[in-house]
Image: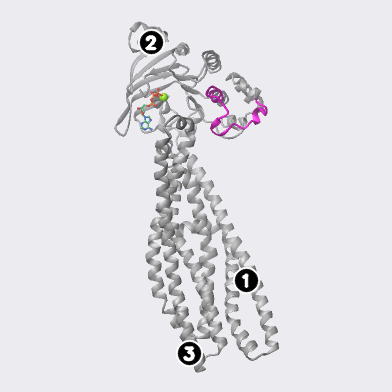
Amino acid sequence: MEKETIVFLYRLFKKYWLLILLALFGSILESGALAGVAYIIKNVIDDVFIAKDYQSLIFVIAVLLILATAKQIGFFLKDFIYPLVIYKGVKQLRETFYKKLLNSEPSFILRQPTGEIISRFTNDLERFSQITSTIGTNVITETFTVIGIIAVLIYRDWKMFLLFLFAVPFLSVALGYFGEKRKKYSKKLQESLAEYTQHLNQIISGFEVVKLFSKEIFYRIFKKINENLFQREKKNRLYETLYLSSVEIIAYTATAGIIFYGGSRIIKGEITPGDFFSFLGGVLILVNSLQILQRGIVNLKGLSPVIDRIKFILELPQEKDEGISFEGLKREIRYEHVSLKIGENQILKDINLSIKKGEKIGIIGLTGSGKSTLVKILPALVKEYEGKVYLDEHELKEYSVSSLRKHIGMISQEVFIFNDTLRNNLLIAKPDATDEELIEALKKAKADFVFKLEKGLDTVLGEKGSRLSGGERQRIAIARIFLKNPDILIIDEGTSALDVETEEYVMDEIKKYFSDRTILMITHRLQILDIADRIIVMEKGKIVEEGRKEDLLQKKGVFSRFYSLSQKC
Ligand SMILES: Nc1ncnc2c1ncn2[C@@H]1O[C@H](COP(=O)(O)OP(=O)(O)OP(=O)(O)O)[C@@H](O)[C@H]1O
Ligand SMILES: [Mg+2]
């Protein structure tokens, strides 16, 4: 095992040392009992079968009973407690994973395929748990057994033991060669499994869209993924089997040699039949133990690639939450020469904009013109910009991200609803809110539909909120905003799924409730721009027009063209 792997395991499991000691005791008990059985065979043959001594028979049976009891106690301790330690460690890992995920850089996570991350949480952890369990149950226990049995073998007949030892170099060559192959395919297999999970994930999350398009292409893609997975499973298994069978061939050849050599020594009278059978019994236990041990060691070869995949999650770039606390806007938001380039794509170009506290800004522009990116800078969801963004006298990056997010609220087109009760879905906006407050917020968001739900706030919203229509989901998002009561409010097409009448009602509520707050409102529906003090028009990452609605209409520029087009609809 590599040093890093050992360090990783040590850090994870060291606090369970007492349990590990108990399990180790179980291993020793079991191994000791097996060695005892191999040892006592000599007495069975020589004293009972050959000397026909009745007292020896009673003695031998009593010893065997004690050995059997010790072995079973040992078996229970090792077979239950090693895995228990692993489960405790894995539980801890899952929790650390989850924390790392929630604290990671948003831009980094958005660039990763979802399935890749999920499979590290599921398949890789499962595999880690399987492999590490075998360290205790197979590797450690069988190592003790091997040591105990070897002691018995040397004691019974060291010459014959040397003969047996002759097989060892052959064993280690086979071990090295096939072990390497196994390691390689174990890693490839994990990658294929991740690809498989990821594809299913995408199909299920976009199921309705999938239905409306050609299934043929999906089948074709899937068949390729499935074939790949199969080939790797096959190769993985093949090398494992080759590995194990080469070990067996060598071991049984050695056994044949022992029977030949031992037999001739009994004939010559150099050893007793009891010595021989005790030795042979020991060899059979040893072969069995070596096989289990090797299987454990083969498995261990897969451990370091799995740990590498686990470490990816543990090393996810984490957001730093340091800096001064943003306690709400006092005077203004000011963008100074803000540009943003992702890859070759210039998303924002030299944005200069200042927004007074309490001002309501409407932002419009063609799709892809950079509107969402512009506003996502404020709650630090987008950080890679050049230039400066000031909130009062401090640049955005001087503030701690958590304080920014606490005071900046956002309603978007995409509403995040998780598979839990309506109450919990609302409480994420204000964890200590009372039921009355939740209902009040739902009313302001005109989310009347929830009052018809049989279980009210306890209704479990289906996965991805599938029990709700687009407009209903959006009203939950709006209710959350009333609960969160942010200082700066961003509405990124946050009412686009509502009918005109409901939208007007909700906008009036927002206007009334947030009258003194700063609001940035992105919309494609120009009618609701009436609440805006000022309108910004964006085109290809630039602000191309800016001013009051009436002035922009008079100017007969981009905005007035948009406006007359929207009037025609
Ligand atoms: N994380 C990202 N990586 C690469 N390109 C991005 C990323 N986010 C946005 N873009 C690109 O930036 C451009 C502006 O996107 P943005 O979402 O800001 O547009 P928008 O004006 O809000 O459009 P819409 O009206 O469609 O919502 C688009 O071309 C988009 O593809
Ligand atoms: Mg957008």
| Residue 245 drawn above or below residue 359 | below
Q: Is residue 112 visible?
A: no
On whether ligand 1 comes within 8 Å of the CB at mark 2, the answer is: no
Q: Position of residue 409 (x, y in %)?
A: 50, 26
Residue 339 left/right relative to 288: left
Location of mark 2 (residue): 565
Q: Position of residue 242 (x, y in %)?
A: 42, 65
Which image quarter: residue 216?
top left
Ligand 1 - quadrant of the structure image: top left
**Mark 3 residue type:** Ser
Q: Position of residue 130 (x, y in %)?
A: 52, 56
Q: Residue furthest left?
A: 344
Disc 3 versus disc 2: distance between alpha carbons?
106 Å
Q: Which mark is residue 264?
A: 3
**Mark 1 residue type:** Lys
Q: Nearer the viewer, mark 1 or mark 3?
A: 3
**Mark 2 residue type:** Leu
Q: Quadrant of the N terminus?
A: bottom left
Residue under the point 47% across and 67% down = 294
Of the pair 7 and 416, the residue shown nearer to us: 416
Residue under the point 61% across and 61% down = 80
Residue 66 left/right relative to 8: right
| Residue 342 drawn above or below residue 294 | above
Q: Which mark is residue 71?
A: 1
Q: Earlier in the sequence, mark 2 or mark 1?
A: 1
| Residue 560 drawn above or below residue 349 | above
On whether ligand 1 comes within 8 Å of the CB at mark 3, the answer is: no
| Residue 227 drawn above or below residue 426 | below
Q: Earlier in the sequence, mark 1 or mark 3?
A: 1
